[in-house]
Image (spheres, rainbow, N blue to C red):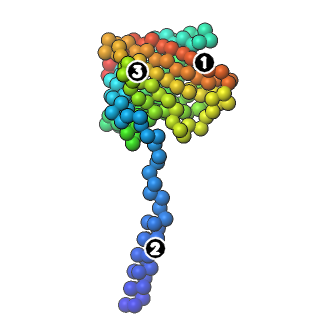
Amino acid sequence: MKYSLLLSLAAAFTILAGCQMTDSTPQEVEAPVDTASAEAAFDAIKSLEGTWEGSLVFSDGREMPTSNEFKVVSGGNTVVETLIEGDVEMATTYTMEGGSLLTKHYCVLGTEPTFVGTLTDGGSIEFVPTAGTPYTVGEDDFVTGMTFDVSEAASQTLRRTGIISVDGQDVTNEAILTRTTEE
């Protein structure tokens, strides 16, 4: 009897000690400027569901066809964007976390920058790098910012701009996209 009581106490102590050793600190997410703005931006991204096509023009003079497909997944909790620029396919995800619109871009440059997005009064969604993005402008090749002008999305037009740091230089791009299919 005494042995089983000691064994039970030892088991309980081991379980409790294990619980105290567990790190229960939640992942830190950059505080949003305005949660309502982040939620409105996410709703605007979800409203883009479907395929959009157009031409992408870079500040260095290059031009190429582009196609963006937005798909709402995970019960409406995430949007996956598949973008094709020329012959290159990339992906970007959008989701709400901790009151922020978090975005992760899986780039042909081999980088995966993360952004926080907010809706401006003018009807644009601005994406700025999160504090945890491990890339440095001027040192690493990565997308440093994006903007979606969704003010005319209801009329089937989307203007998308971006800034990419490549070889220490900023290259900007702009695409005017037209919705070709709705999901």
Q: Position of residue 41 (x, y in %)?
A: 37, 28
Alpha carbons under labels 3 and 1: distance apart: 20 Å
Figure quadrant of the N terminus: bottom left
Q: Position of residue 105 (x, y in %)?
A: 51, 30
Amino acid at circle 1: Val
Could you tell which of marks 2 and 1 lies nearer the N-terminus? 2
Alpha carbons under labels 2 and 1: distance apart: 57 Å
Q: Position of residue 128 (x, y in %)?
A: 50, 29
What residue did someone put label 3 on? 124
Q: Secondary structure at mark 3?
A: strand
Q: Secondary structure at mark 1?
A: strand
Amino acid at circle 3: Ser
What residue did someone put label 2 on? 14
Could you tell which of marks 2 and 3 lies nearer the N-terminus? 2
Q: Nearer the viewer, mark 2 or mark 3?
A: 3
Q: Secondary structure at mark 2?
A: helix
Q: Position of residue 74 (x, y in %)?
A: 35, 37
Query: Vertical placement of 27 versus 10: above or below?
Result: above
Q: Nearer the viewer, mark 3 or mark 1?
A: 3
What residue did someone put label 1 on? 171
Query: Vertical placement of 18 versus 92: above or below?
Result: below
Alpha carbons under labels 2 and 3: distance apart: 54 Å
Query: Vertical placement of 49 versus 97: above or below?
Result: above
Q: Nearer the viewer, mark 2 or mark 1?
A: 1
Residue 46 in view: no
Viewer-closest of 59 and 109:
59
Amino acid at circle 2: Thr
Residue 6 in view: yes
